[in-house]
Amino acid sequence: ASPVSVERVTEQEESCQMGSNQSGSRSHVYEEAARCYTTEELGNWEADFHHNAHSSPDTGMPCLDLRQFEGWAGKGGLLAARVFVGVGEGSSFLSLDQILQAKMAAERSPKASAINLAFRCARGSSRALTWEELKEVMLEGILEIHGAASSTSAQEVALAEAASSAAASITGERPDLIRNSDITQDAFHNWAAQVPALVNLLLSYLRPSGRTAPLVPTLHSNCDSSTNLLVHAAHAWIIGSMLQDHQRAQWSLLYNSKLHGTSLSTFVGKCTGRGAAILVVKDTKGHIFGAFAAEPWRIHADFFGNFHTFLYQLIPTTRVHRPSGKNDKFQWCAANFQSVRNGIGFGHQENRYGLWIDKDMTSGSSYQCSTFDSPCLAHTTEFEIDTIECWEVSPSVKESNNSSSVTGSVLDRFKEDRAVLQMAGHAGHSEGVR
């Protein structure tokens, strides 16, 4: 990837204005920002700005060049250069007003304003944003998230594949046919609204105010090595951007078919009674896709779930498919029933599922589905499974507080054992007894 060029344009230094002009009065941008942020926030940003800034030899006004902007932002690299150019709209220097305007566009304006700003940043110094350039920007982001220095050659191939898949989803056409075609701002908007991972990362260089959700969930797997894991940091960054902020803090591995075996009873035992979860499936042709189980897994002879449930595709294209409102057949989990189909499912139309995992956990199917208006997610409608993973997303505050305590009856503990007994037809006779 070639770095973004930032040419020095002396005339543009005149656009560098600080929060107050030479007469001491505040600019209209600063006054507008004062209505959006606290005095403490503005004071900290302004102090840090002056700490990093230099005075323009022509105007005498404090401005930031690229290196100084990296110091203010607290991080540098290729993406920092893109954000610098995008915020300055080609200027070689940034004023405090320009930074405040960008922050307000990112945080205090309609979502479209933030996406417009991210579009300018992704484009960088180029006159247009092509599919090839967007793929390059995604790879820059993925390498930053994953850590380029720690990547093996095999991981680098996987990361490049993730970048290409995310960029490919911006158009329905084959990437090789539109490689050098310009991406319209409307197309970028539609793409970023579905998968806002890149927008979130680019705008993080503007030092988001207040408490913000992490860009990448912390992954807890209790595994000695991550080589057997399907989800890595870059995948979590992209999938996590589809979730609500509070679900992007920490993910805990509940089940991995290569680590725990291809057993529905094991899956049910490890996943029921926990929180909302991300299901990730890789078929034997290399396609990666899955679902967000918005309600905790439970054995049930009917559909359950809610309108936060969704299906998604990750490789070779990245898309999210949210409920259409046409029916409420969101989530299915049945085991050891005689009269209903046993397995895991999401979405349903004419006896077919948007995503189905058979009870043997080695095969599944994915058909066009009205529940999510989703296409086939896998390589083919009937597929063989390479790996299945299930990750619990961040628990609620109440769950977090309770997790440190071991009090309560045995009915609240050993949930995996109780789930297996339930599958075997042994009713929970002590349920409700405390």
Image: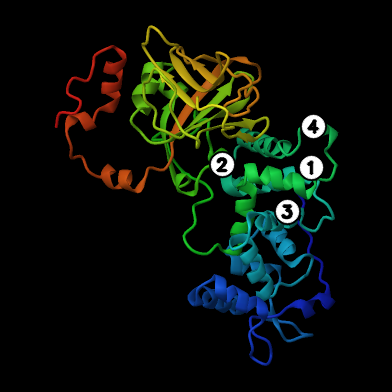
Residue 138, horizontal then vertical, whole percent:
68, 45
Q: Which mark is residue 132?
A: 1
**Element assignment for label 4:** loop
Quadrant including the C terminus: top left
Residue 146, horizontal then vertical, whole percent:
57, 44
The image quadrant that residue 289 belongs to is: top right
**Element assignment for label 2:** loop
Is 215 placed left or right of 396 in the picture?
Answer: right
Residue farthest front in this picture: 326
The answer, for residue 161, to whether it is visible in the render is yes
The answer to whether the residues at label 4 and label 2 have Cβ atoms under 8 Å apart is no
Residue 363, horizontal then vertical, whole percent:
53, 14
Residue located 76% across and 32% down the image? 172
Query: Which numbered disc flags the more N-terminal residue, 4 or 1?
Result: 1
Disc 4 residue type?
Glu
Disc 2 residue type?
Met
Residue 213, horizontal then vertical, whole percent:
49, 53
**Element assignment for label 1:** helix
Task: Indicate which label's residue lies in the foreground, 2 or 1.
Answer: 2
**Residue highlighted by disc 2:** 242
Query: Which numbered disc flags the more N-terminal residue, 2 or 1?
Result: 1
Few, some or many C-alpha atoms within 10 Å of disc 3 (few <14, some 14-19, many ≥20)?
many
Looking at the picture, tell me which residue is in the foreground, 60 or 423: 423
- Marks 2/1: CA–CA distance: 23 Å
Is 230 placed left or right of 414 in the picture?
Answer: right
**Residue highlighted by disc 3:** 119
Query: Which numbered disc flags the more N-terminal residue, 4 or 3?
Result: 3
Looking at the picture, tell me which residue is in the foreground, 62 or 191: 191
The answer to whether the residues at label 4 and label 3 have Cβ atoms under 8 Å apart is no
**Residue highlighted by disc 4:** 173
Residue located 59% across and 63% down the image? 108
